[in-house]
Amino acid sequence: MAICGILFLYSADGSKLLIELYLTDEPHIIKVSIIGDTGELQKILNSGVDANTQNANMWTSLHFAAFRGKIEIAKMLLENKADVNLRNHRKWTPLHWAASNGHLDMVRLLVEHGAEINARTEDGSTPLHWATFEGHIGIVAYLIEKNANINAENRSGSTPLDLAATEGRVEISILLLKNGADVEGGKKDIWNNQKMARRLKAKIGDIATPLYHAAATGHLEITRLLLENKADVNARGRYMRTPLHAAALHGYADIVCLLLKNKADANAITINNETVYSIAKSDEIRKLLKK
């Protein structure tokens, strides 16, 4: 990924010389695609060079075009049989990069040319996961329109709604919920079964509901939104903590107050026998819990 870092640092002013200086090990077709030289790219393609040429990390020219939002380069590559679904060493497709970096026109182009809408990266994330995580609501809306799996879970068990809740993406959370996102993130049944939770504890870092994530990260509006959409106020997360545990632990008094008003169980006990009161971060929160 060093190349990507270099592009962020040096390509903002369009300096061709600076970009070329750091691409000496790249296949020529990839260099030209990164720089965005359509004339030179056409010459290379006309000479018979494979549009699907990959570098050491299995990136193609189309990956880089998608990464940078270079529409004309992408069109030329696709017209010359570039494989829209080729994956790099981390299993990212060009669509993942376009969705992650906010290039809506590129996303449309790739989907129109057969990009797999629910393609998975090495960690199981889809383009919708990445568009949600980075806050690109237009791309989220487009992917949903194209029947992206709105409740897909990555290998960490996170759905797009989990990511929206964690990152404080209010408008995206609303959009996901309106289009059928599971308000519990598919995890309610797992964590309400204490025997199953104990068995899973050693194997997974964190499987929690969107409400838990919102409470743990201090996002009051998303917490309110999820409660309005009938999220289980006492659903369990990591260590069998409830959203109230999470809010108290991290010091979010406003969220503690909201959860209590929505009948959160102030006496809930975790897998480690922690009460909400015992892990509360501040006296203000402890006072709220005593009321």
Image (cartoon, grey):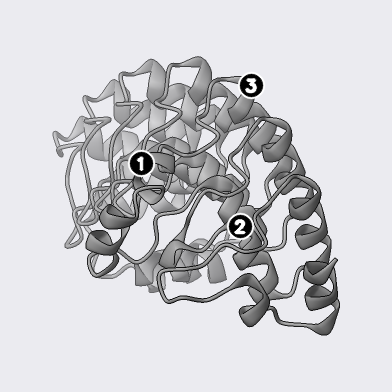
The label number, if any, that marks residue 153 in the structure image:
1
Q: Secondary structure at mark 3?
A: helix
Q: Earlier in the sequence, mark 3 or mark 1?
A: 1
| Residue 207 shown left or right of residue 131 in the figure | left
Q: Which residue is mark 2?
A: 243
| Residue 105 shown left or right of residue 38 in the figure | right
Spot occupied by residue 36 in the image (x, y as percentages of width and height): 46, 46
| Residue 249 shown left or right of residue 239 in the figure | right
What's the residue type where badge 3 is placed? Lys
Mark 3 burial class by Cα count in 10 Å: few <14, some 14-19, many 20+: few
Residue 38 at least partly seen: no
Quadrant of the rendered image containing residue 177? top right
Give me the residue at 47% from left, 45% from top. Answer: 130
Q: Which residue is mark 3?
A: 178
Q: Secondary structure at mark 2?
A: helix
**Relative to residue 103, is residue 64 depicted above or below?**
below
Quadrant that contains the N terminus: bottom left
**Relative to residue 107, is residue 68 depicted above or below?**
below
Q: Label 2, label 1: how many angstroms apart (C-alpha)?
A: 20 Å
271 or 174: which is nearer to us? 271
| Residue 169 shown left or right of residue 288 in the figure | left
Spot occupied by residue 145 in the image (x, y as percentages of width and height): 52, 16
What's the residue type where badge 2 is placed? Pro
